[in-house]
Amino acid sequence: MEKVPVTEGRTTFFAPVQDENAAFPPGSAPIFYNRRMEANRDATVLYLSVMQPSDYLDAMGAMGARGLRVAHEVGIPVTVNDISPAAAAEIRENADRVGGEIEVTCMDANALMSTRRFDAVDLDPFGTPAPFTDAACRSAKRFLCVTATDTAPLCGAHLKAGMRRYFARPMNTEYHREVGLRILLGFVAREMVKYDRGITPIFCFAHEHFVRLHLRVWGRVKNADQTMARIGYVMQCPHCFYREEQAGLLPETATCPVCGAALRPVGPLWLGAVNDPGTIGAMIERLPTMGLGTETYLSRLLPLLAEELPTASFYDYHKVAQRLRASPPAIDVVINRLRDAGYQATRTHYEGTGIRTDAPLSVLEEAITRRR
Ligand SMILES: C[S@@+](CC[C@H](N)C(=O)[O-])C[C@H]1O[C@@H](n2cnc3c(N)ncnc32)[C@H](O)[C@@H]1O
Ligand SMILES: [Zn+2]
């Protein structure tokens, strides 16, 4: 395997040379390394440097990029695991070069997570994390981080696969990326609450082809009940832009007050905030000191996440304008009009034309179509 030194953040490790022409996901090297996931790893290094867990498991290490960076840049004891002996050998070589308190294991992640506990557990599988989430919920003491790259099943493009993996029904709406994130979050919540433990989403976002969750885990029945209370549905009208949120295990029938159609339940999914503004604020402060390769991207993402309203969906105001045959004004104009009308309104990181608001649809339409 041909390898080259790669530097991410303040860490240099060896990674396989990938065939630039190979189809995505990069599978041209025997061991996986994807430069395009640097933003995902940078985000985690920044997050963990604020949270400072006492130890960390990278349950699917591949070349070890993520775990080695956490050991080196966050400065905490790390275990890097991979089921592949060839990958584990590469992780060991990289660990010797990088230094730090690094243990390398070569096990099925589910076996490892079923027998040992770690303050922070990180799942970074190929595709869906669903087969690993139960063991991760048992293994994680205070922090759980999860990547999913199966965005088509999560977002509603592959409906049956999504239902099999997450026991939820997505819908391909204009906010499908948010539906994907919230269905994954709802799934992790359900895997956790059966152990009488709960979660709080701290730093969760979608980017390119992945969803990334950073969660705080809590150990009491009370926390599990609070987590359960966040499970529910977005009730979406199939004919117009109307939607409403409904908490609870089972969806109850509802009718669109705008056009009279039966609303369709999307979920079960997580309702409420998916980011903690206090933690995000601390990350924004720390960001310039970290030397991260994707600092520019993160410096745009984090303030957006900190201000996003905790609604479970957003409107694509260009699509609303199109339906009204109106030419859309600038996004800030619409947001300011909503605020002037006494409602809350923010952008969203999912889409440049996305608006989150607690205003009724009719008020949003008026804010889009008003001449001046
Ligand atoms: C997407 S890659 C991990 C990428 C890595 N975390 C990074 O940031 O570069 C997924 C890895 O999971 C490993 N894997 C697959 N099934 C596994 C299992 N059951 N237990 C542990 N590792 C597994 C594969 O060998 C592969 O190296
Ligand atoms: Zn309707």
Image (cartoon, rainbow, N blue to C red):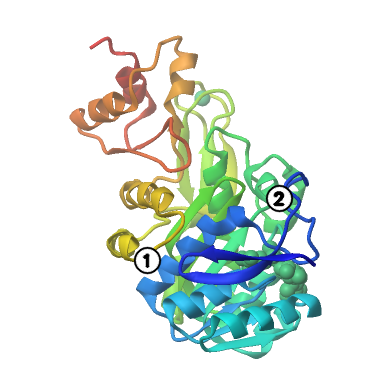
- Whether 266 is drawn above or below 339: the answer is below
Q: In terms of secondary structure, where does tag 2 sit?
A: helix
The percent coordinates of residue 304 (x first, y second) are 35, 46
Q: Is residue 221 left or right of residue 371?
A: right
Q: Is residue 121 left or right of residue 2?
A: left
Check the picture and name the quadrant holding the N terminus: bottom right
Q: Nearer the viewer, residue 347 or 184?
A: 347
The residue mark sitting in front, 2 or 1, is 1
The residue type indicated by label 2 comes to Gly
The percent coordinates of residue 290 (x first, y second) are 37, 66
| Residue found 75% across the figure and 55% down from its top | 164
| Residue found 54% across the figure and 85% down from its top | 99
The percent coordinates of residue 339 (x first, y second) are 22, 32
Q: Tell me the crowding category of disc 2: few under 14, some 14 to 19, or many 20 or more residues within 10 angstroms, Cα based.
A: many
Q: Which residue is mark 1?
A: 290
| Residue found 58% across the figure and 42% down from its top | 265
Q: Is the CB of the residue bearing disc 2 within 8 angstroms of ligand 1?
A: no
Q: Nearer the viewer, residue 356 or 74?
A: 74
Q: Which residue is mark 2?
A: 162
- Whether 101 is drawn above or below 244: the answer is below
- Whether 338 is drawn above or below 222: the answer is above
Q: Nearer the viewer, residue 366 or 83?
A: 83
The reply to whether residue 248 is in sight is: no
- CA separation, marks 2 and 1? 37 Å
The reply to whether residue 340 is in sight is: yes
The residue type indicated by label 1 comes to Met
